[in-house]
Amino acid sequence: MSVKKFIKQIKKTLGIDDFEKKSKKKALKLLLKKLKNRQETLKKTPQKKLSIKEKKALSEEQKIITLQIKKAKNILEH
Amino acid sequence: MPTLNIYKSIFIPITILLLFTALFFLNSYPNVSTILGGIALFLIGMEYMEVGFKAFSSGALESILKKFTNTTPKAIFTGFLSTAIVQSSSLISVITISFLSAELMGLSSAIGVIFGSNIGTTATSWLVSLFGLQIKISHYAMPMIVVGIFLPLFSKSNSWRGISSVFIGLGIIFLGISYMKEGFETLKNGIDLAQYAIAGYAGVFMYVLVGAIATVVIQSSSATMAIIITALATGQIDYTNALALAIGANVGTTVTAILGALQANENGKRLAVAHFIFNILTGLLAIAFIYQLTQLVDYLAQYIAIKEDDYTLKLALFHTIFNVVGVVFVAPFIALLVEFLNKLFVPKGIDKGKSKYLDSSALVLPSTALVAIVMETKHLYSNGFDIISRGLNLKKKNILSDVTLERVIEDQYTYKAIDIDDFYQYWIKGLYGEIIDFATKAQASMPPEYIEELYKLKLANKDIVEAIKDTKHLQKNIFKYTVSKNNYIKEQYNDIRKGLVNLFRTIEQIKISQEDDEIVILLSKAKIESKRYDILSNGTLDRLIRHNLISNQMATSLMNDSDYAYNISQKLINMAEVIFIDINSDLKKLSQDLTITEEEINKHIKEYS
């Protein structure tokens, strides 16, 4: 057995591979939560006081956040 | 200019102090009060003149100082003429220091301008002696002030406001001189200061010291000279002592320069020390040869129709002569002086190209080696940022501030392209080589999971270097087309600059952000923005060509340059993703999965265009 295969076997036995995946999922969940919070905060921004340019920038930012939330959810589901 | 700043910060207190002292002596010593009031008016007048000339002639003055200072004799003459006309050596020093900092002027030229400016500043002595004392100057003061006040009513332009300030300033100066003269004349009836005249070298040293102290206190050699000349005209001081006082005024003015230089950068310090050395040497020469110089003044006075007993004009002549003699003696050693000053104040930039974090002790652990490389790559980026911003003709401080994009692109760094190869040679090449060398050494003992990160870091370094090289290509046309008469091409090149300013600002935000979600959003925004400025894909270039708004040559340049700008932004975003996301953060594991794709970017732009 080569060294690489041996290390892989050990990782599998100790469940280190799963641990890495789990920590990534945990980080992703945390990020998702932060993104959702930010989305909520932006939704509450009073639009009346904003200029057209600022409204456009706000809408773009919301769109980007929605896209990132979608991406994060996709990764979590698969 | 630090000298100017320090003068400005104490100008108001000095003037107020003079006025309060004048009020204090009003009843007990009305003549002293008149003299002090006259000095305060003189200083206020000088301030008005400077502000006026700044507004009225700064553009022309800058062009003259840029164009006519390439050789030392030219620089001396230009420094002399501009100071004599503007009547403000501080203003000339400010412009000289700013040119020196922007590398538009070499140190030897800057020293030449300052030497010339020293001769030019003696014009004030001539002004006071010729006009202030020979004619009834106060008669002209009021009409000048009135003209100055009414001029802005006819035109609101900056130039006219400047001219009006010059008029008001001259009027107030005339008024100040007439008060000083009147004060000294009446003082003579009570106390005769001339009785304190000291003969021989003891007197010379004593009065040099008095002149220097007076200038340090008033912070203006011109004001000291005005006092000396009016006191001499009224017979309150002896001619020889007046000469010594004039030498003292020249020496005293350097104290202001030295004080100011304490807070200045290397260029400011070098110039202040050059000024100090020059004035001290000139002062020593003048003291050593004071009697010979007096004879020379007497000899020359005959040829320029100065009467034998006209001591005020003779003093003005002496003031000019000893400054000219100083320049003649010191100018041949400017090259030596430059060498000495460069050794005395090593510019900070010289260490920019040397590594700060690549210590061999960091190689012991893979994690510390990685951190050292990240830190050094950030250092490389900082140098790269300096070069790219200069290449785009932008001031770094503006990019890092919150001023509008329009203001950032308007406030240009320089008027001609910088040599990016030179900057690359000093600030990048060696440092980049050291990072790669260190990374290679670190790799030898690194476990596989670190090697992927190390590889990304190497790529980030390469991205910075390539972004600088792209800037070099872009720079030529930036300088050409941002001053073009064709507004369409000008707008496109300014849009390129604005886009890159936006990117730098986003990177700065990423750099300081502690929130993962904010970094993810900022990176996505940066990618979308950079794609938006890619005029090849957004149809701008097609529109400009189709409507014949730009020439074929312009179109080709714009096509290539927008490509360079797009590449610069892509490389900098890639670099930011690697070096500004904390190596131990959760986001490091996720950033690749969350990267916004080309398709998503295009869809987003389509939606918001």
Image (cartoon, coloured by chain):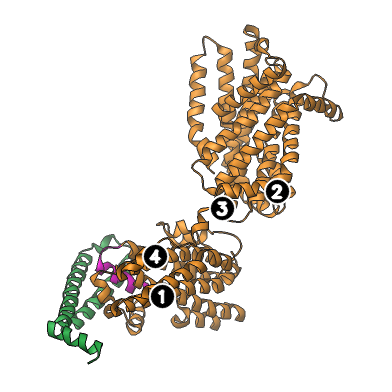
Chain colours: A green, B orange
Q: Nearer the viewer, mark 4 or mark 1?
A: 4
Q: Please identify the quadrant where the C terminus of chain B is shown.
A: bottom left
Between the C-alphas of marks 2 and 3, the distance is 17 Å
Pointer 4 residue = B360
Q: Residue at x 49, y 68 (%)?
A: B497
Mark 3 crowd level (few <14, some 14–19, many ≥20, 10 Å Cα) = some
First in sequence: mark 1 vs mark 2: 2
Are the residues under badges 1 and 2 in a single subunit? yes
Looking at this view, is B587 or B564 the one in front? B587
- The numbered mark, 4 or 1, whose residue comes first in the sequence reads 4
CA gap between label 4 and label 1 equals: 12 Å
Label 2 secondary element: helix
Q: Which quarter of the figure has residue A26?
A: bottom left
Mark 1 lies on a secondary structure that is: helix
Which is more N-terminal, label 4 or label 3?
Answer: 3
Answer with mark 2 or mark 4, whichever residue precedes in sequence.
2
Residue at the (48%, 26%) spot, across then down: B16
Q: Main secondary structure of the magenta part?
A: helix
Amino acid type assigned to the residue bearing label 3 in the image: Ser
Find the magenta span and give its range: B513-530
Q: Mark 1, mark 2: which one is toward the viewer?
A: 1
Image mark count = 4
At mark 3, the secondary structure is helix
**Residue at image mark 3:** B101
Quadrant hosting residue B293: top right
- Kindly report which numbered mark, 3 or 4, lies closer to the viewer in this rendering: 4
Residue drawn at point x = 42 percent, y = 70 percent: B438
Q: CA distance from mark 1 to mark 3?
A: 38 Å
Pair 2/4: label in front: 4
